[in-house]
Image: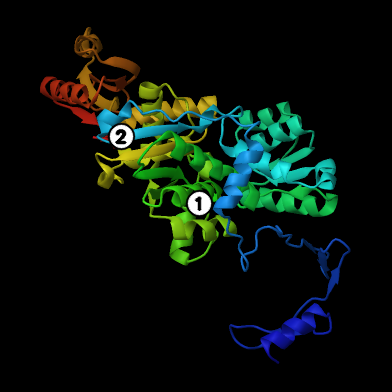
Amino acid sequence: MSQTAASTSITSQLATVKITESDGEDRPVPPTETKADGAKVIDNGAVEQPEFTDPFCNADNPQIITFQDVTSAAFRIKKGIEYTPCPRSHLSETLDMDIYLKKEFLQFTGSFKERGARYALLMLSDEQKQIGVISASLGNHAQGLSYHGWKLGIPVTVVMPLKASLMKIQKCRDYHANVIVQGSDMGQAKKIALRMAHETGLTYINGYDHPHIMSGQGTIGLEIVEQVNSIDAVVIPVGGGGLIAGIATAIKNLSPQTKIIGVESEKCPSFTKALENGAPIYTPNKETLADGLAVPQVGYNAFATTVPLLDKMIVVKEEWIALAILRLVELEKCVVEGAGASGLAAILAGHMDEFKGKRVVLLVCGGNIDTTIFGRCLERGLAAEGRLQRFTVRVSDGPGGVSKLCNLLAELGVSIKDIMHDRAFIRDVHSVEVKVICETRDWHHTKEMRNLLQETYEDVYFYDMPMAI
């Protein structure tokens, strides 16, 4: 019996055996019962849930958006979307590049996602608007959809994975959305949302692969070309791929010589893996500072639209993202999330040295960073730059031993953040081991401190070498 014949007979529930690829032997297959909703019940009582697909995202027939799609979106959404500034950055002189920041985090909900969400909602039929929409999102798409659905009078349901930021979940509720927190990651949340769409008649709107979503995001590219002349490169964060697909479509039509650069975190390199595979492929994600980019599989439409227009793809380490967040706070007074800072991270990490002396636009696309995560990012950025230091030093346990160490650091202008003593685990009863976490002004100041400590004490150990030196 051939595999095809076996598969057909199983589907029709007439066969009881199939051929395996491993050894060719016939093995029994439990009979199945198909329920009205598409679920299958096998003989042991377990229920196998069906896979519901997004009708707008077909791997065999991807939809590639056009420049006309983007201009149509720009006309329809302009009354409900902020025209965000794109000023020259203070970082230009420091990094030897003419850098401009497209500040999309200044949208009302703090993210570029509003553009695509509003356009997708406006393009619904009257019946679809009355019934409502549903989507899966880590936060920014959910907020954009919830806010504009509220303003347009369209019911919105969002499924957010358990790892979604509590702040983003609450914001969606503030915008009167029906919020469901389920699924360990975006992949599971999407499956839940698709099933609910099938059961309730809600229209599913993919946050990064729906053609109207991509077209809406592409309006950013139209604004960039209006705001900055003679652009050599535009650096765009990549998660599901909808943002870079839309912007690349707009910019390559208006300014073909401009390079389109994508950037993603090493913890979620979905687009890079898709390029290696030649098509979107599931890529397990790890916890990342750039949670807005943590999409396990890029969209079929987004991938097909982007690949012919993409000039370079960059993967950056988490330390550089943390340092980029710190730089934007200190030099630009911009509080952004990891996804929004990833473009600057690519420059800081040295991945764009070929653009030294050239004009580069960075998309600073999201400002919805969780307060707790923000504090951790700043500390990690300080550590990556060498301004936050850890060291252990053995000093005299007599009167004034620890005081001498503290006075030495104070005279250098070093700020002690934490200090801990250990007497139990050293052999010399007349000494104490002191672990210190301290902050310096810069790497030159750090080297001065290290040299002085090594000259003063025989036993001193520094834990980490910084990333950005």
Q: In front here: 159 or 343?
A: 343
Is 123 positioned to the left or the right of 322 in the image? right
**x%, y% of residue 387?**
29, 25
- Residue to which mark 2 is pinned: 98
Colouring convention used in this rendered image of the protein: rainbow
Which residue lies at the image location 48% right of the left edge and 66% below the top edge? Answer: 278
Q: Position of residue 267 (x, y in %)?
A: 45, 47
Which residue appears farthest toward the left when viewing the image?
455
Q: Nearer the viewer, residue 153 or 296?
A: 153
Q: Position of residue 449 (x, y in %)?
A: 19, 21
- Characterize the local packing of mark 1: few (<14), some (14-19) or many (20 or more) Cα atoms within 10 angstroms: many
Marks 2 and 1: in contact by CB < 8 Å? no
Secondary structure beneath disc 2?
strand
451 or 205, which is in the foreground? 205
Outermost residue, bottom side: 1
Q: Amino acid at mark 2?
A: Asp
Q: Residue 275, percent across and down? A: 45, 61
